[in-house]
Image: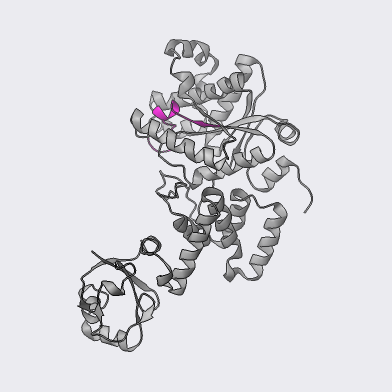
Amino acid sequence: MKKMTNFEELEWRGLVKDIAGDDIADKINNESITFYWGTDPTADSLHLGHYSSLVTAKRLMLMGHKPILLCGGATGRIGDPRPTAEREIMSIEELNHNIECIRKQIDELFYGKAKLVNNYDWFKGYEYLDFLRDIGKYINVNYMLDKDIIKRRLETGITYAEFSYMLIQGYDFLNMYKNMNCIMQVEGSDQWGNITTGVDLIKKVLGKNAYGFTMPLILDQNGNKFGKSEGNALWLDKNKTSSYELYQYLINTDDTMVEHYLKVFTFLTPDEIVTLLEEHNKEPHLRKAQKKLAECIITDLHGKEEYEKALNISEALFKGEYKKLSAKDIMLGLKMVPTIKLEDNITLIDLLVNNGICVSKREAREMLSANAITINGEVCTDENKVIDKTLAIEEKVLVIRKGKKKYYLGIFN
């Protein structure tokens, strides 16, 4: 593949939607500039929707640019306007807790090389009247009403607090331009109106040019955003979404989406992605592209050891090799299957019927004689077999399979 400039590669990966600044490509290709990406601390972890922006910020850092990652202690007290309704106000204690959790995630992901800031630091001493005099006079209300997100909320109603969010974020950019030499903002496309407000403020107040670009919002195969408000959050904190759960999600990525995700979420070179997709398309059932996607993302987020652990759990569960796993790993891998509480010293046929695995003793006997019942991967045929803790993994967990696809997780007290 022909050698690309930095900006051409961003475009090839589908990471550029809107642009502020005619010579932005030249800046990205030929200079080392300071830029920022920001988020509000609405939870104690970022999620996969944020990760697409973080990977872009990290990609820019590896190109030689200097990232500032802003966590909105000020803007988080208000909440940016959502398309449907106002965000729930969070307590200051919860916001501060979330900020510290996010700081740790960002610091680890960027190897400690990103500058971390909190916009409450420059807003906490700013008098309201001074802000209106210094900043508010530069932004026309008609200009604000013309922004897409504001237009969408006018019909259902928007509070003054939400309406002012654009001005506050615009000041963030102006402040960092003056004090940190930050000349570019990079965000998801839903932040375009806020980016241009900052660019305009910098032009009007300082007479200087600023830059920005937005990335298309990353959607799942059903056309939904990855996000907490969408109810499908995949958290970057492995204690909230385990590496195994993330692996399972990514390995099941639809073929129609996997090329896009490889370009957005991984640091594979364009040549490596093209070669991988050629191999994948020859034998799509092997899911080589999905496996590489999962490896790249989990390794970047949690390290090689976590990726290998997720892979081992997945392969052991697929092969029915449960005894290779710990009870904790099995409960993690099978958390979505029906769970039953087990009594100690119960016959197999009573276990099957009493817990609704089979509807009757007749059906249970038919399944047993057909070798269709397994316990921890071993075929069972004896209806009078005594089921007790000695059969369980770590004397706690049994995996019961009926037929080829129905699984039950049995847990002893």
Instruction: Tell me residue 314's x, y (percent).
Output: 47, 65
Instruction: Tell me residue 399's x, y (percent).
Output: 34, 71
Residue 262 position (above or below residue 288):
above
Specify the quadrant of the image occupied by residue 258.
Answer: bottom right
Relative horizontal placement of residue 92, taking residue 300 as reference (left or right): left
Can the viewer see residue 134? yes
Residues rendered magenta in the picture = 69-85
Residue 94: say if magenta: no
Can the viewer see residue 143? no
Going 40% across and 38% down the picture, which residue do you hit? 84
Residue 188 position (above or below residue 317):
above
Residue 100 position (above or below residue 337):
above
Residue sticking out furthest to the bottom: 369
Magenta stretch, main secondary structure, is: loop
Going 60% across and 15% down the picture, which residue do you hit? 205
Relative horizontal placement of residue 84, taking residue 15 as reference (left or right): left
Looking at the image, which is closer to me, 392 or 233? 392
- Quadrant including the N terminus: bottom right
Instruction: Tell me residue 230's x, y (percent).
Output: 42, 46
Rendered image coloring scheme: one colour
